Amino acid sequence: MQLLSVNLAKPHRSEYSDAADNRTGIDKQPTSDPVAVSAPGPRGTGGSALAGDTIGNKRHHGGDEQAVYAYAREELDHWERELGRTLPNGFFGENLTTEGIDVDAALIGERWQIGVPGAGPLLEVCSMRIPCRTFAGWMAEERWLHRFTARRRPGAYLRVLDPGRLRAGDAVTVVHRPDHEVTVSFLFRSLTGEPELLPRILAAGEPLDHEARDKALRRIRA
């Protein structure tokens, strides 16, 4: 299991961006340089965990619970076949393009050691991507949001537990895997069409991002 590439934003303006200045960082390009990773701070003020990366709208994106976005190369390969077009690493806006990791089967609270302990960062799976208008505009594919949602493999958001540096080719080691059923895909399903699953996501405990937890609690109280 490894990082196939580490990707940083090439910011541009888009009519589909939800940022005030219409800038978006969804176009991410691989870098061969080592990249420093640290917790960016809370949503609204914190952006990406990766030095040199850009978040277009900090109100809705970035922060500690969306600090790092990981997506599997195997999923990009699936969409290449489905769409009949080339999708380079970083094209879905992911910071980390992985190889040999079933990202969507990762459990909320699962911890990934990148590279060498004490040098590479320690990351914790805490949430997943909800596809947005900016993503749809960037892809320019018919009914893209519906198609991506129906796949139920959105990729994972991770928070930074320990800072460090990472680069393409670094090994990814799962050093902790909690004992519950709430995978990235399960969480995505609960939030995008199967609300009856929401009470069950609370089993993920403290690592679960606060917005998902709040939705589950509202469901229970309804």
Image: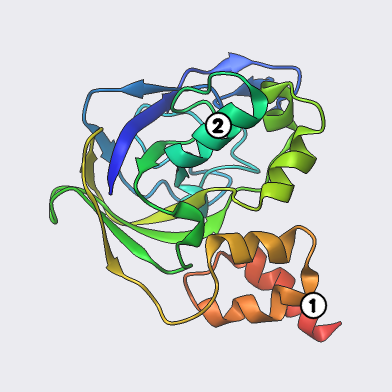
Q: Residue furthest bottom?
A: 221
Q: Which mark is residue 108?
A: none
Question: In the picture shown, does residue 118 fall above or below 95?
Answer: below
Quick check: 187 left or right of 103? right
| Residue designated by label 1 | 219
Q: Amino acid at mark 1?
A: Arg
**Outermost residue, right side:** 222
x and y, in percent, of residue 214 in the image: 69, 71
| Residue bearing mark 2 | 92
Total marks shown come to: 2
- Sequence-first tag of 1 and 2: 2
Q: Residue 77: image x %, image y %? A: 50, 33
Name the residue: 57% across, 53% down.
128
Examine the rendering and report whether any part of residue 23 can be seen: yes
Question: Residue 189 vs residue 67: left or right?
Answer: right
Rendered location of residue 95, percent (x, y): 42, 36
Residue 18 visible (yes or no): no
Decide if residue 139 is on the left or right side of residue 209.
right
Of the pair 59 and 129, the residue shown nearer to us: 129
| Residue found at x 65% / y 31% | 82
Q: Position of residue 151 (x, y in %)?
A: 67, 48
Residue type at numbered disc 2 = Phe
